[in-house]
Amino acid sequence: MTRALEAQERHERQRALRALLRHPLLPAAGAHAASFLLVRRHAAALRAWLARYPRWSLLVEPEQARLRKTPADLADGTRPALDPHHGTPFTRRRYVLLCLALLALEGEDRQTTLGRLAERMVGYFADDPALTRAGAFELDVQDQRRDLVHVVRLLLDLRVLTRVAGEEQGFIADQRRDVLYSVSRPAVAAMLNVRRGPSTLEATDAADLAARLAGIVEELAPETDDARNQALRARLFRRLLDDPVVYYEDLAPEERAYLTTQRPFVVDEIERATGLVAEARREGLAMVDPDEELSDLAMPEEGTEGHLTLLVAEWLAGRARDGRLVGRAAVEQRVAELVAEHRGRWRKAALGAGAEVELTDRALDRLSALRLLRWTPAGVAPLPAIARYAVVAPSGPSGPAGAPRSGAPLAGPSAPAGRADGAPRARTPRKTR
């Protein structure tokens, strides 16, 4: 009986940690209520593990749980926030509007309207010369109202806002059609994930923006050998928990050396805490999710863009064997060929004149986020994990010799193994960090 209880408790802790990894801002109500209860029940154990290994902090309040995830790579822009309705990625402008919306909500009462929020943001643009130079925010322009609605939809998805009356789509058509919201002040306060308040940094030139961004999440530099080893361990845990694939060539020499000697310990801790399964190959290491619950990007995926991305991955996998770079123009040409080949089965709205340009962007962005390729000035560089999508010839009863089979891993020690669909998993988009 004791073993059964221990197994149940371990399973509950795994489910709670997985929920936090997928939703770092986890509301107590709504679709995530059951996960929140597990997080609250096991908060002490979760808090201790997260502080010891990835060095992330966990705050559990009556309204929500907030996992403050500091990414291992602050410069990674492959997984932006997405509009919950259409999956549209956030642009730099929408991120600016998100920050200004949070600033406006700080001064609101328990309820506000979309029109009031928009007016306050217009005022921020008018009062700040830097924002004015970057471009005005004008409610008379429908595209700019649409940008604001994308921001509001994200805040609704995170339960920072709760819709009381009205519809955002009406505001896009006519700014006089307002929407009423309830405001969760604890969620507003929890959104910003920094170690230092931006106002505590010295004002510097705009060209030094990268340094300022690094300053708000800067951690204390380790001074002893033990502290340096702990910092190395934390960076590796963050990568393995947050990235689809960790390639050894992307690690600093000291990180690679630590992982080489401590890999069994690191992998065992992550597997026991999360239920993820390690997949180690010559080129790197991935923590695979057998249940596909943590994947924010599926591969393969249904629909026009999902099918296209899989076909592009297969095509690029054939060029990964010899390390050849692939030019952007060549990828667009291949996408145009695939559009012509599958026109009868794909969504018509995505197949207009010149559609291959946007479809190529989306396919390459998805493959980049999954760490299956890397952009370089000379072209697209397929990465080793893309080999699992290569077309190979099966042998034996599974099919006639020479018949192509999609999605199979390449033979050889460096080929990533995986599930039947061969899908690596991507971690949570960086929308709530």
Image (cartoon, rainbow, N blue to C red):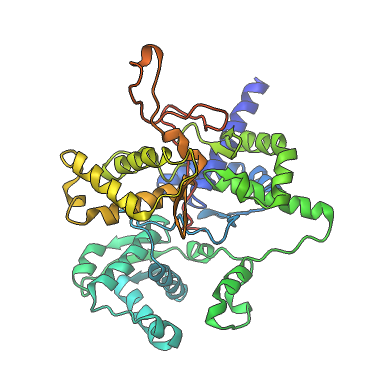
Q: How many marks?
A: 0
Looking at the image, can residue 274 be seen? yes
User: Of 223 and 75, which appears nearest the observer?
Assistant: 75
Q: Which residue is located at x 29 percent, y 46 percent?
A: 334
Q: Where is residue 56 in the image (x, y as percent from the top left)?
A: 64, 53
- Quadrant of the rendering where the N terminus is positioned: top right
Q: Position of residue 96 (x, y in %)?
A: 43, 72
Q: Which residue lies furthest to the top in this view?
A: 397
Horizontally, residue 215 falls left or right of residue 33, namely right
**Residue 378 sits in which quadrant?**
bottom left
Q: Which residue is located at x 54 percent, y 27 percent?
A: 412
**Residue 138 sits in which quadrant?**
bottom left
Q: Where is residue 204 in the image (x, y as percent from the top left)?
A: 59, 83
Looking at the image, can residue 84 be seen? no
User: Of 242 and 33, which appears nearest the observer?
Assistant: 242
The answer to whether residue 247 is above or below residue 206 is: above
Horizontally, residue 334 falls left or right of residue 62, namely left
User: Of 400 and 294, which appears nearest the observer?
Assistant: 400
Q: Which residue is located at x 31 percent, y 65 percent?
A: 149
The answer to whether residue 175 is above or below residue 392 is: below
Q: Where is residue 385 in the image (x, y as percent from the top left)?
A: 50, 39
The answer to whether residue 128 is above or below residue 42 is: below
Horizontally, residue 125 falls left or right of residue 249, namely left
